[in-house]
Each structure stands twice: as C-alpha cells, then as structure tokens.
Amino acid sequence: MSPPDPLSLPSIPRDADGPVFAEPWQAQAFALTVQLHEAGAFSWTEWAQALSEQLSAAGPGDDGSRYYEHWLASLERLVAARRLADPAALLERKRAWADAYRRTPHGRPVAL
C-alpha cells in the first residue's frame, strides 16, 4: 500500500460521530473550497499556499481555534485574486449577512 498523495483533496474531518465542524458555515466553506478547486478555479497547491500564508500571518500565538476563520479568509482572498467574485460584492454580502444575523432570534436560521 502506498502512502497518500500529500496534494490530494482532504476528506471531510470526522470523528466517530461524523463530521467535526463546529458550525454549519465551516462545513460550507470547506465544501465551497473543494467545489471551486474541482471546477478548476485554482489548483490544490495554490489553495494550500494561500491557507499556509494566512495561517503564518496569524502568528505563533494562534491556538488553532480560529482555523476555519483563516480558511474562509484564505478562500475570500483567492476568490478575489482570481476575480471569481467582486470584492465589493463580497463585502456587501458580509454586511447583509451580519445585519440578518443580528435581526434573527436566537435558535432560528439566518435568512438573507
């Protein structure tokens, strides 16, 4: 049996009970990254470099609890660099989501 290819797509993080995303948005960011890669938007090497740069910029004091925030920031930067989405449109979407989140009663799904 040969070792796994280090550049292959990651599998969804799991434990004995299933996927290990703390929040639904983490799973969505993960899935969107894989989907964009599969559509040819960027190579896995390019993605790994973008994420590595983001994690390095966080510094040695980062305890790993913000991993998916770094993941999302890396994805946003790569999407903007590839001109897959307009940075102003991304910012407006973030603002709209934050407004919707603040207006949504606790325990209810956020709807835009």
Image: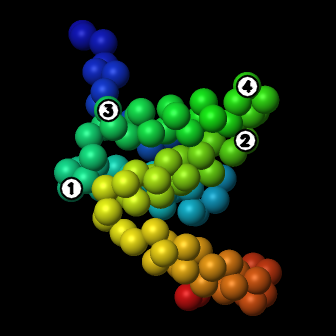
Looking at the picture, which amino acid does disc 2 mark?
Ser
Which residue is at a point 20% across and 51% down the rendered structure image?
40
Viewport quadrant of the N terminus: top left
Frontmost of labels 2 and 3 is 3
> Mark 1 to mark 3: distance in Å?
15 Å
Q: Splitting the image into 4 quarters, where does residue 109 fall?
A: bottom right
Query: Looking at the picture, does residue 74 appear above or below residue 58?
Result: below
* Tag 2 secondary structure: loop
* Tag 4 secondary structure: loop
- Residue nearer the viewer, 70 or 7: 70
Residue located beneath label 2 in the image: 65
Which residue is at a point 21% across and 55% down the rendered structure image?
39
Left or right: where does residue 107 sit relative to residue 48? right
* Count of numbered labels shown in the rendering: 4
Residue located beneath label 1 in the image: 39
Residue located beneath label 4 in the image: 60
Frontmost of labels 4 and 2 is 4
Viewport quadrant of the C terminus: bottom right
Q: Position of residue 31 (x, y in %)?
A: 40, 55
> Mark 4 to mark 3: distance in Å?
23 Å
> Mark 1 to mark 2: distance in Å?
29 Å
Q: Residues within 10 Å of mark 1 (few under 14, many from 20)?
A: few
* Tag 3 secondary structure: helix
Residue located beneath label 3 in the image: 45
Q: Splitting the image into 4 quarters, where does residue 102 fall?
A: bottom right
* Tag 1 secondary structure: loop
Instruction: Name the residue at the top extreme.
Output: 1
The first of marks 1 and 3 along the sequence is: 1
Looking at the picture, which amino acid does disc 1 mark?
Ala
Left or right: where does residue 55 sit relative to residue 10? right
| Label 2–label 3 contact, CB within 8 A | no
Which residue is at a point 62% across and 51% down the rendered structure image?
69
